[in-house]
Image (cartoon, rainbow, N blue to C red):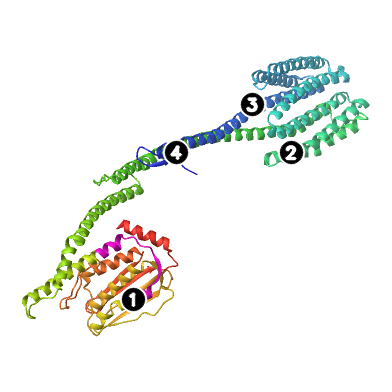
Amino acid sequence: MRRTFVANRAGIMTPGGFSIRQRMRAGFALVVALTAVACGTNVWESYRQYRQGSLDLRDFEQVERAMIALNLISAERWPANALLAHRRRDAAADVTAVSAARVRSDQALDALRTHLVQASVLDAPERGIALHAIEAIRAELAGARQEVDTLAAQPPDARMVWQVQSAQDRMFAATDDLATLAHDVMAGTAMRHPDTANALMLAHLLGDLREYTGRLGSLFVASLMRNAPLDDERIARILQMRGRIVQLRALIAGAIPPQLADATLANDFARLNDTMEGSLLPLVSATIRAGRTGNYAMNAEDFTRRIMRDLRPAEQLRDRVMDVTRARAVELRDAARFRMALSAAEAACCIAILFLLVRGTQRTLSKPLDALSRGIVALSQGDVSPIVAVPGTGPEIARLNDALDRLRGAYARREVLERQRNDMLTLFSHDMRAPLTSVVVLVGAPAACPLDCTLRERLHEIGRLTRHTLAMADGFAQVSRAEAGEYAPELVNVSDLMNQARDEVWSRASEKEIDVDDVPYCDDALVHGDPVLLSRALVKLLGNAVEYSASHTRIECSVELAEDRASVRCVIRDHGYGIAAEDQARLFERYRRFRLKGQPDAKGVGLGMAFAKAVVERHRGEIRVHSVAWQGTTVTVTLPAAGVCGPAETMHSMEAEAVRE
């Protein structure tokens, strides 16, 4: 697949024609958008939970006000029962209690009405129905109160049982109407908040338990006032009410387990069961048995107080359930508000960090890279003027600046060396080689002069100098070709090349009576390289060993595969004159020759070691020299084994080395 590359203003080819800065801005915009979406989703979800928690609390307040009103109207019956059951002439305390209970009931109804008017979850028809129901409850409650007041104004003996029961039924009717309204409010809240439906249902059941328990006690009051037996209809109603209480207790026992994690609520539930089992239900059973004959164990006033005391555990447990549910709703709302604030802060921090990251990247990476790219383009166009360091805070940019400066210096040195080499090649190949070759021809021609002719001696000296000059030119040309020439690597055995080099220097070694070791054949000493170059390098190294060794010495040669089988190692060790320590650092420089004090002069032009080093490095190898004055020199050449570096890699390496040099 083809890709389109377009040069930006800095000269860098980028796919699709977009610069790094443009891509960075696009990426920043995309990341900011994704971050905003993700964080916005979290913020919106947190806000939704917070709003839901706030609505829960408002709905709980509405349910609580309805339950409070229902509880107070139900509780209003007991001061009324006490007033009607009171047989003393001074009933001021009971009258005060009834008045206070009525005030509390009216205030609770007013608060419920106000809350219904302000409730946002109710539409206009629902609000109208609820307000109309409250007015009907007020009217029904007013009628019941009027009947109670009428009976209370009569002497105790004049109060008939059916009149007391009629007043109680009016109170029951008002309570039933309000219970219906409270049930509707609670059902709507449970539907809107299903997570709290169980707690609301439990509170509703506890309210019904309290209501029906109170009604059960009220069914006995009229008969206790007159010490009259219970008729069959009254007993049937009492038994029916007790059955409802049993059912409600079973329902409460099934709904309350999720709430028992609260220790206080669990204690209140245990207290309710103890009251029901140990006080209320036994009292009801004993009163039913006594009611068949009319011989009651207590009067109406004491019975009323006993029932009122037994109603408190149900009230406390219901209030505790509502408190726990409200506390959980407040906790969830506050947690949602905290998460909303945290999500908003995280979103702001992420966007700020991204912004700072992009700005910092542009300052420390994009802008310096643009400047560096312009410098590289200028360098490629031949501008080798000193490059001003690009300001950057990171070490990577500093290293790039250093690398670019080294590249400029290398480029400048390369141009200078290339020009010098071309000039020297021209000089050696044309200006010196042609005349010197003619001189050699003339010197070697026959001459008709005596053997002791001074002219012949001079000509002999001219010939020697001329051959030396030719050797310099040939050596320089060899080094230059070794550094920059093109070669096709072959698979060669280094032990064979070492023996060939030994054969090359054998005649000179024989003249000086120097023994050169024969290298055993090694099957594993295989490398990829140019056989001519490698052979000539080994000849140079062996020739130096022979030339700089005294007569009647020995030169040790070895070729072996390294222990890690990654390289082939060649070692040439002589016992000659050695090299001074201060001269070894310049050993591979061109035209450098070193001689110890008292050492005989030797032939050469100082290019052998430079040539060997160039050949070894062209083959990705390494050459090391260890020498001690007057003790000898050891030269170690290490070349990559054929199994480690293939011919293609070797060829690429040789080309790279040529370009680098």
Sequence-wise, the earlier of marks 2 and 4 is 4
Quadrant where the image shows the C terminus? bottom left
Residue 330: which disc? none
Q: Mark number for residue 58? A: 3
Which of the labelled discs sits on residue 256, or is there none?
A: 2
Going from the N terminus, do you reach mark 2 or mark 3 first? 3
Question: Residue 483 in magenta?
Answer: yes
CB under 8 Å between callouts 2 and 4? no
Q: Give the spatial CA distance, label 2 vs label 4.
A: 68 Å
Q: Residues within 10 Å of mark 4 (few under 14, many from 20)?
A: few
Residue at 23% from the left image edge and 69% from the top image edge: 584
User: Does residue 480 appear in the picture of this structure?
Assistant: yes
Camera-nearest label, 1 or 2: 1
- Kind of residue at disc 4: Gly
Q: Residue 377 lies in what quarter of the image? A: top left
Pinpoint residue 157: horizontal percent, then vertical percent: 86, 19
Give the residue at x 82% y 33%. 245
Mark 2 to mark 3: distance in Å? 23 Å
Q: Say which of marks 3 and 4 sits in front.
A: 4
Residue type at the position of mark 1 = Gln
Quadrant of the rendered image containing residue 490: bottom left
Q: Amino acid at mark 3?
A: Arg
**Marked residue nearer the N-terminal end (3 or 4):** 4
State how far apart marks 1 and 2 are (Cα).
104 Å
How packed mark 3 is, by other alpha carbons closer than 10 Å (few <14, some 14-19, many 20 or more), is some
| Labels 1 and 3 touching (C-beta < 8 A) | no
Identify residue for label 1: 500
Label 4 – label 1 distance at C-alpha:
59 Å
Q: Are marks 3 and 4 in contact (CB under 8 Å)?
A: no
Give the residues drawn in magenta, as a range: 477-501
Q: Earlier in the sequence, mark 1 or mark 2?
A: 2
* Residue that mark 4 sits on: 16
